[in-house]
Amino acid sequence: MGVTIRKKHGRWYVFINHMGKHRSKSVGTDRRVAEQVKRTLETTLSLGDLGVLAEEEKRTPMFENYSKQWLDHYARLECKSSTHRSYEQLLRLHVIPRFGKKRLNEITRDAVKQFASDLSRQRIIVNKNTAAKKPRFSRNSLRLILSALRSVLNAAIEDGLIQANPAAKVGRFANSEKPANKASALTRLEAQRFLEAVRELYPDWYPFFLTALRAGLRRGELIALKWGDIQFGSSESASDRYIFVQQNWVLNEFTSPKSRKARRVDLSRQLRRVLFSLYEQRLAEAKADGRISIADDLVFPSKAGTPQKPDNIAVRYMQPALTKAGLRKFRLHDLRHTFGSLLIQDGASLAYVKEQMGHSSIQITVDTYGHLVPGADISWIDRLDGPEMTHENAPPAHLEEVDREDDSSQVVERIWLPPRDSNPDMLIQSQLSYH
């Protein structure tokens, strides 16, 4: 038996652990009240009165009811609309059918592990002729499902309904096929061929796809980009040229970028030239209509002046251009991966790429593009052998010199690599000094 008290976020909670049953309850902000409740419960349980446990169990809500309350009172207010919608779908389709009729304190860690394992073993048929199957859920889908469950249970801890989260750190054992490198990117030559095809087929879309390749913006960020977000700088050679990414277009509404962080993306000379030409054209059109500024106008609007429909872009413009260029199928998001990949291959630091792409952490950058870092090959291992092993089949230059001059002092002089403190072995230094 155990009754403990703990303060969390300014409130005191009483936790009961008795005969394998765990209960918790918020008792206010006064520590003395919490200690008094603790002593009362200890006395009650020591006398064998388990009514308090039964009463508390009845008060603990079902997961289905609590999760709906959480969606309405927390997720809707604290999360973006797209995030709220994702939580709602994941809970409704996957989590509630499994745990909906259980009370929050009845969900055990073993049950959550079994849930994750069952999801990872589900398969779907991809070829009816061969009956070939593949996992129903990708590793990322499994992660999102468990994350939704974990988020609801974390809120239950905050409300004092449960003591610990049974879904914490669950999911690593859930096997699912995962590609070695998730990012698919065009090569520099493929990107150039794609842009040439776009210019030929859809010249009005050339600035859009060039911006995707040269700035690495996400689809919604491209659609939400406004002229006031672009700093052209004083000239093409000036360093103060950039795009300030501060909006995203998701589910038919403007919102903040992913991770709620605005960022500054440097503007290449070529992209500046193309966008500045388009800007002058749009500004002239606006002045003809009696307007003096287009700062609040979208850079890539639809013909009606409204935001583009995201799902139409790849189907109507990108895929035909890829076919024209003789390239395989790529996603619109792969143009963003191309931006990051080419930066890395050109020698940009991972920290710079992280800031340009707006990753929430450098670990994401490393996981996605780390394999592209220049020099990440066997040549680094060969360097461990030392300079004398690099050309072991070729006669060293200093040996040829010795054969000609037969001068031992010259031998010592030529094998010693200055400065003096480059060799930490004091015995060798002493011998060389003696010679």
Image (spheres, helix red, strand yellow):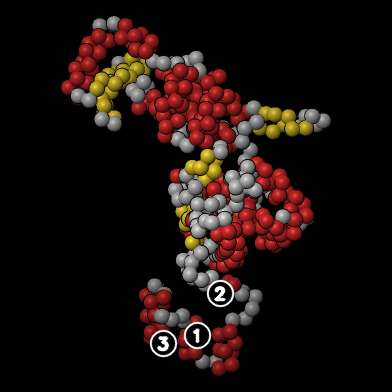
Give the structural element (helix, strand or loop) at label 2. Answer: helix
Residue sitting at the far bottom: 405
Please name which of the two marks, 3 or 2, marks the residue nearer to the observer: 2
**Measured along the vertical axis of the image, is residue 423 above or below residue 175?**
below
Report, in whole angstroms, how far the alpha carbon at label 3 lies from the one at label 1. 13 Å
Residue sitting at the far left: 32
Q: Quadrant of the N terminus?
A: top left
Give the structural element (helix, strand or loop) at label 1. Answer: helix
Disc on the earlier residue, 3 or 1: 1
Disc on the earlier residue, 1 or 2: 2
Residue type (three-letter) at the residue carrying disc 2: Glu
Q: Which mark is residue 414?
A: 1
Residue type (three-letter) at the residue carrying disc 1: Arg
Which residue was labeled with disc 3? 435
Disc on the earlier residue, 3 or 2: 2
Rendered image quadrant of residue 154: top left
Report, in whole angstroms, how far the alpha carbon at label 1 lies from the one at label 2. 13 Å
Q: Residues within 10 Å of mark 3 (few under 14, many from 20)?
A: few
Q: Is residue 383 visible?
A: yes
Q: Quadrant of the C terminus?
A: bottom left
Q: Position of residue 102 (x, y in %)?
A: 47, 15
Rendered image quadrant of residue 187: bottom right
Write the residue at 53% across / 70% down: 236
Q: Is residue 213 visible?
A: no
Which residue was labeled with disc 2? 388
Write the residue at 74% across / 32% down: 126
Write the residue at 58% across / 24% down: 93
Report, in whole angstroms, how far the alpha carbon at label 3 lies from the one at label 2. 23 Å
Write the residue at 49% across / 82% down: 415
Residue type (three-letter) at the residue carrying disc 3: His
Viewed as shown, does residue 57 lie left or right of 227? left
